[in-house]
Structures are given as structure tokens and as C-alpha cells.
Image (tube, rainbow, N blue to C red):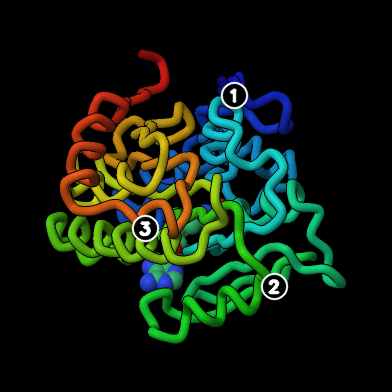
């Protein structure tokens, strides 16, 4: 497992810093304190990643080897860009030979080797533009998309689950055989229909809570490994698919860091 960073001394900053009481609301002050004292935030700064989210992908990859040998990667909900940084690195993507396409409706600072689309992934044009941008069939589709929070937990949950579902359909439509799909989901939140769809189309489906994902967050990741290919899935009749989904149920594992 990717080791959690220890203490704050590697970055030259001490952990346990307090933010002075002033104009900030108490909740904002608590958020800021947690952020500046978060060892993963400090480590991201030290290692040149744009976000602490980098360590979630690195941790998942360390165990599941989904990035090794990947030639093309599509990154959904990519801003500020730490997953794209990793993707560009593993694919050897350069501006002359782009192998990573990233999409976010937020503006994202340019990254070498990454074609950035500033667009809603739910826009009907997004799938075509992403495939054009990555220049060929992707081996890996990664999605860290989370719907903007409304303050109403159930609504936020439903919206993020919808993004996960649309991303899964996209992955099944575009991935190369043997490819992988990783997406943010919520604890206990993955719909049975979506799980069955993934189990029909991939060799293994796993729920993962990386150690670098905040314990208090309900976020989890859904990893579908080893895409069986569009022909294989299309040639099965309904009964066979159901049997397979039932068999695969045994392989729907959960990995919680530290357990
Ligand atoms: C947790 S952040 C991603 C962090 C990123 N993985 C990184 O390493 O820097 C989630 C992102 O999903 C984006 N997002 C949410 N819904 C989206 C949508 N419908 N289309 C495009 N991006 C979306 C948000 O704008 C946000 O930037």
C-alpha cells in the first residue's frame, strides 16, 4: 500500500497548524485547518501533483496495476489535473503525440501531453470529442467526477451516481479489450443494475476505499478490470448474461484500506 506520509517535516511545514480567528466562518476555518494540516496535501505539493487525489489513483494502481502498459487514457472530471499528470507520465504522452484526453467543465491549466476539453461530460458531444482528442482506442477510462454539492446529501449522491453510470456506459463503448474502468462512487451506493452491467463486461469488479481517501468521506472507488470486448458481450443472450452476473457476484470484492 502507498505509505501515508508521516509528519510534516518533509515539506518543511509542521502539521497541527491553526488558522487565526478572523473573518472566516468557523466551518471555513476548520476546512482550511484540515487542508493545510493534511499530510497528503503537503506531499502532493512536494511531489508536484496538482491535488492530493493523485495518491488515491497511485494507491489503487499499486495494488491493481491498471496503468502499466496503458497507451491511451481518458480522464473524466479531471480538474485540477493530478490524475492527468499521472496518466501523461505512464503513457509517455507528449504534445506531439497526445495519449491522454481530459474533460472537466471547470477551467484547467494546460498540462504537457494532455488534451483538455472544458465541457460537461453529460454533453452529447463529449464522447465523440474525447475519442477524437485521445487519438485512438483508450486502454483505461478513469473518472473522479463528483457532482457539485447542493447541500442536500441525497441529491448530491444521486447526481454523482448518475455520472458514474454514464461514465461506465462510455467506458463500455470505447475501451480496448482488456482495458480497465475506474470511477468514483459512494459507500453502499452502486446500483445493482450498474454492478451487473460491469460484471457482464469486465472480468473483475472491486470496490475500493484507498487509505488516502478521507475516512469521514463516503467516497469509494469502483474498479472494473479486464474489459471483455464489445463482441464478447454482444454475442451472449440474456440468460447467459444473468448466469454470468450471478457467478461474478462472488468476485465483487471490497477493499478497505487498513482492514
Ligand atoms: C474530485 S475533482 C477531480 C480531481 C482530479 N481527479 C485530480 O486528480 O485533480 C472532481 C471534478 O469533477 C468535475 N465534474 C463534475 N461533474 C462533471 C461533469 N458533468 N462534467 C465534467 N466534469 C465534471 C468537477 O468539476 C471537478 O473538477
Task: Please identify, in this view, whether the residue under mark 3 or under mark 1 is nearer the observer.
Answer: 3
Based on the displayed image, in which of its 4 quarters is residue 96 positioned?
bottom right
Find the distance from the CA under tag 3 to the CA under tag 1.
Answer: 26 Å
Q: Are marks 2 and 3 in contact (CB under 8 Å)?
A: no
- For marks 2 and 3, the one nearer the N-term is 2
Q: Quadrant of the C terminus?
A: top left
Q: Within 10 angstroms of label 1, few (less than 14), some, or many (20 or more) residues? A: some
Judge by depth and name the residue closer to the eye, 100 or 226: 226
- For marks 1 and 2, the one nearer the N-term is 1
In this rendering, position of residue 203 left or right of residue 180? left
Ligand 1 quarter of the rendering: bottom left
Residue beneath label 1, please? 2
Find the residue positioned furthest to the top: 259
Q: Residue at x 68, y 63 (%)?
A: 100
Q: Is residue 146 visible?
A: no
Residue beneath label 3, please? 168
Q: Is residue 161 visible?
A: yes
Where is residue 21 drawn, in percent x and y? 40, 48
Q: Residue at x 52, y 38 (%)?
A: 56
Find the residue positioned furthest to the bottom: 125
Residue beneath label 2, please? 135
Q: Is residue 243 above or below residue 32?
A: above
Q: Is residue 81 above or below residue 66?
A: below
Amino acid at each position: 500500500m502507498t505509505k501515508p506520509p508521516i509528519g510534516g517535516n518533509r515539506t518543511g511545514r509542521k502539521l497541527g497548524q491553526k488558522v487565526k480567528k478572523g473573518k472566516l466562518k468557523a466551518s471555513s476555518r476548520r476546512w482550511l485547518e484540515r487542508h493545510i494540516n493534511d499530510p497528503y496535501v503537503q506531499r502532493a505539493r512536494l511531489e508536484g501533483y496538482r491535488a492530493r487525489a493523485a495518491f488515491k489513483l497511485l494507491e489503487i494502481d499499486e495494488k491493481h496495476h491498471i496503468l502499466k502498459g496503458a497507451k491511451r487514457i481518458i480522464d473524466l472530471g479531471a480538474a485540477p489535473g493530478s490524475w492527468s499528470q499521472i496518466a501523461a507520465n505512464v503513457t509517455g504522452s507528449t504534445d506531439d503525440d497526445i495519449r491522454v484526453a481530459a474533460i472537466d467543465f471547470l477551467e484547467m491549466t494546460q498540462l504537457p501531453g494532455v488534451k483538455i476539453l472544458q465541457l460537461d461530460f453529460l454533453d452529447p458531444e463529449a464522447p465523440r470529442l474525447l475519442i477524437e482528442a485521445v487519438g485512438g482506442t483508450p486502454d483505461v477510462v478513469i473518472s473522479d467526477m463528483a457532482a457539485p454539492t447542493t447541500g442536500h446529501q441525497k441529491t448530491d449522491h444521486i447526481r454523482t451516481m448518475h455520472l458514474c453510470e454514464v461514465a461506465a456506459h462510455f467506458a463500455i463503448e470505447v475501451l480496448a479489450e482488456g482495458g480497465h474502468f475506474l470511477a468514483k462512487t459512494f459507500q453502499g451506493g452502486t446500483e445493482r443494475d450498474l454492478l451487473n452491467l460491469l460484471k457482464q463486461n469486465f472480468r473483475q469488479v472491486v470496490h475500493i476505499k484507498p487509505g488516502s481517501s478521507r475516512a469521514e468521506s463516503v467516497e469509494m472507488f469502483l474498479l472494473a478490470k479486464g474489459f471483455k470486448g464489445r463482441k464478447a458481450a454482444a454475442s451472449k443472450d440474456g440468460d447467459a448474461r444473468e448466469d454470468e452476473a450471478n457467478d461474478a457476484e462472488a468476485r465483487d470484492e471490497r477493499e478497505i484500506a487498513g482492514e
